Amino acid sequence: VIVPGNNAAERVNLPRNMIENSMFEEEPDVVDLGKDSTSFPAFPALDPDEVVFEPRSSRLLVRGLGENDMDEDEEDCESSARLLGMSFMNRSSATRSDSSPYTRQAPPRSCSQPSTRTMVVCVLLLVVVVSMTMALYFFTGCKFTKTGCPKPNNTTPVETVYPVSTNGELFPWAELRLPRSICPLSYNLTLAPDLDKMTFTGHTVIYMSVRHDTNYIVLHSSNLNIANATFKLGDGKASNVTVLEYKPRDQIAVKFSEKLKRGQHCVLTLEYSAKLSNTYDGFYNSSYTDKNGNKRVLAATQFEPLAARKAFPCFDEPAFKATFLVKINRKSDYMTLSNMPMAKSTPLNDSLVQDEYKKTSVNMSTYLVAFIVGDFIPVTKDVSKTQVSVYSVPEKKEHTDYALDTASKLLEFYNNFFEIDYPLKKLDLVAIPDFLAGAMENWGLITFRETSLLVGKQSSPLEKQVVASVIAHELAHQWFGNLVTMSWWNDLWLNEGFATYMQYMSLQNVLPQLDMGNLFLAVRFRALDKDALNSSHAVSTDVNTEEQVEEMFDSVSYEKGASILLMLNASLPGDQQFRKGIIQYLKQFSGSNTDTDGLWNSLTQVSTQHQNVSEMMSSWTSQKGFPLVTVSRKGDQVTLTQEHFLLTSDNAMHTSSMWIIPVTYLNDSCSLAPECRQLFTLKTKTGILKVPESVKWLKLNYKNTGFYIVHYGDEGWRALTEALSANISVLTHEDRASLIHNIFALSRLGRVAFHQVINLLNYMSNETETSPVTEALLQLNRIYRLLDKRQENIVVASLKNYILNLFAPLMNKKTWGEEESVSKQELRSTLLEMACNLDEKRCIQQAKSLFKQYIESNGTSRIPGDLQRVVFTVAAQSDEGWESLLNMYGHATYDAEKRKMLEGLASTPNTRALAWILKAGLNGDIIQTQELPLVISTVCNSFSGYLFAWDFVQENWDRLIEKFPVGSFAIQTIIKSATSQFSTQRHLDQVQAFFSSLKERGSQMRSVQEALETIRLNQCWMDKNLPSLRNLL
């Protein structure tokens, strides 16, 4: 799946590729061994259907509390303490009652000598005790433990604790993940949506095999009203069965008096009804206004990660692959689509038709099933043995040609690159008018936002880059995710990291004019920024709740996943070894599920130099964060030292994390060509390499292909700064951007003073390439916004002048006409947006002039696509301009342009207008609710809007989590936008208090921990750097 991005300046935060923008758990001090933990050795597997819960006293013993039970109040205290990250055992004794069994008694002040008689009695007693103990040991089988023999069952019974179903019966399963005793083989689905009443009925037949003896079948169902259920075993007769439901986990179950036996086959048939969802997941309703002003209704699906269960009862986990036969009833004036080609259409009566689709020719996970009911028309092309079609609403058919051409080229590329042909007969790409994600990779029926698929004839190259990126990402999923699927959501990166990596790699080959290298570089910088937080998480990490499943769709799974794949590819010898490894991986696990180890083992198998890929790469996927490599040099000896780059770092958080780092480096004698690159593998805390003493400077991490940051020390930074000042061409533009990113990161870490940052940036007046300029402006803009929100007016004015003076030579060279190069468009839009944001007079005048021409020509005078946002933003600063822009927004039909108008509207300083636009985005009538995360993000950028947006989020939290699931990328974006520019203790306390009050409504989200950590870091940076900034600027 692809998550939509926000504005261009921040679009490098992509999970856009998400087009994707931009978490994380603290380690508890108390470890409960009753819960799964990778910290302890695995025990022999239980029977798949057995869930054994320890008795209460046993659980307390494991936590180290001795054999005494706690009363209820004390147990509540322990729970609260663990939530606060404190050890229960460290509670002050003052909080305990005098009668507490845990109170340590003071020793007596003196000890008297025992008499001889007492000594004899004691020895006799000791002999008796030892004899009895030995008798117990050898004759009763009691084994000594810390607590002695277990108590009889009548005092501490071991019993399984089952939840209670909605009808009051005990539900037979007590885990988030389903039992493995039953495996679905195929589904027959019949759905009958009523788009007038916004309801649907369903008939689901599930054919299953029994893997282990069991008395029950457990599967998923969410908000489905099951009216009837029958069960058939083997060739027997179908009989009615009772369905139990446990709503907190979206599970239903059927219990049997006699065990189902391993090897048997059975059929469960369920009839049900439900409402079409009014959010963006499950089987949901949507609408749009056609060219005649009429409202048109449609229904579409979005099942990843946990929403197939909202459309039909199913085993809704990635590992339960099956085949699907889909039938959909519709009115005669609608059409339908599903994963497979249509088999036949059958009239049911005068107004209803049933469309039946061919049974899927591949086994699929439930999250990849899809169907649509609406009014779409296609453009089509045959590619190899596959019919490729792009569907849109009729009014936008003319915007589909670019997507069709791009998808066709990419399909051919992937067929050849993977040496495995796309397995289905058709591939549909559908632009949905109301769609939250950027796109979704449903097998054979990929769904998109309109802005992610449709391109107007006069679209800018940057808009084409967006569309091509999303298409490349989703097509890559047809192999990575669909053909080979992660076994569980903890390894989501196997889907998303690969699809993200392949989207850049494929387009650099298929459409090199789109200049994907700059975008991928910026994406890697943003992934490093996120992963530097203590609230980050490992690429492959435990996922034990539905909320945690949603939270895996973040920049670690997407961009960090892609970044470490790039690093691995760059470190392998030859240019084909990585490709051979992933072909081996796809062929070995085709049609099935696997985990991260499966990937590394496949790559190790094809290694030409017997490299242990698993050993190296496990250090990058099993622990959070990344290394800081520090360089020190004496003569010809260079010492490299690694440590965890952690922004929130103190003694309590010191980590012993180590990575196997493929360090690339070059020097002043050869610094541009790929042949200049040398490789040194740093496997330990420190490593030593030799260079000629004549070498003036070293640059590590060639083109930033490695996922680490480098600190060169004062001498090293001085040498690199002087080299760039003398001649910027001594390094590639990727390496220059890398130095800029790294020195800002080191400033935030406190390893370099801010004057060193300023010294490096002095060369900028000679810079001509996009990536160093955009990185420098992004970093400076972050600081500018923080200072602005703190109302440090004198420093803000000084920083404004500094930025305008530093980049004036570049800003003054930019024209406002059409520009064909993607790289030049990106550079121009970044520079002019910054100039206008800082109220540079010529920029403001030019933007106003272009908007005036646009208004007077009634929209026929074109504003270049890369300049539309800056022009619309300047226009919205006046009330008159804002009203004109709102009127244009209501009549605009081209979605990419409409989205930029929306960003302009959300940039107004008028608080009444801000209140209106936020409310309109929440209501979803004039502004689609799918755009609300973008609206909130844009409002937060301005001084007049950021507090307003934070209040809005607090006031409307319950409505927000009705629209977007807790933990989802939309919610992550909203939290980050609303809080990331706070830098005071008062705001930290506010944010902490608000999210703490939410409890199960979001208090435990990783993104909340990230928000709190970011505010603390902002506060710390301001405290350390404000005095020096005043002097420097």
Image (cartoon, rainbow, N blue to C red):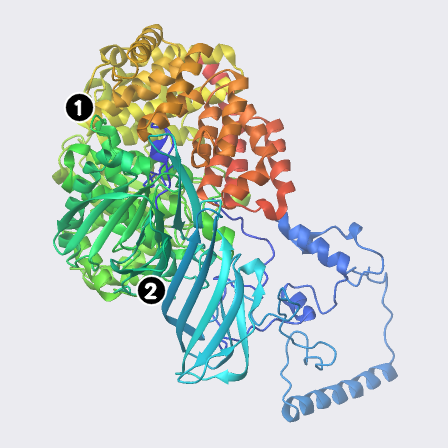
Query: 10 Å neighbourhood of mark 1: few (<14), some, or many (≥20)?
Result: few
Mark 1 is on which residue type?
A: Glu
Q: Residues within 10 Å of mark 2 (few under 14, many from 20)?
A: many
| Residue 772 placement (x, y as % from top left) | 27, 26
On the image, numbered disc 2 is attached to which residue? 324
Q: Residue furthest bottom?
A: 139
Real-space CA distance between mark 1 and mark 2, rounded to the nearest whole angstrom: 46 Å
Position of 800 compared to 957: left or right?
A: left
In the displayed structure, 847 sits above or below 957; it is above
Q: Amino acid at mark 2?
A: Phe
State which quarter of the image contains the C terminus.
top left
Q: Earlier in the sequence, mark 1 or mark 2?
A: 2
Q: Is residue 18 above or below residue 774?
A: below
User: What x and y, as percent, mark residue 357?
Assistant: 29, 60
Specify whether 242 is left or right of 117. Answer: left
Which residue occupies 23% across, 41% down?
A: 504
Q: Which residue is mark 1?
A: 820
Q: Nearer the viewer, residue 937 or 460?
A: 460
Closer mark to the observer between disc 1 and disc 2: 2
Q: Nearer the viewer, residue 651 or 760?
A: 760
What element does badge 2 sit on? strand
Depth check: give the residue in front, 721 or 229: 229
Describe residue 728's horizontal placement relative to residue 979 as left or right.
left
Q: Quadrant of residue 212?
A: bottom left
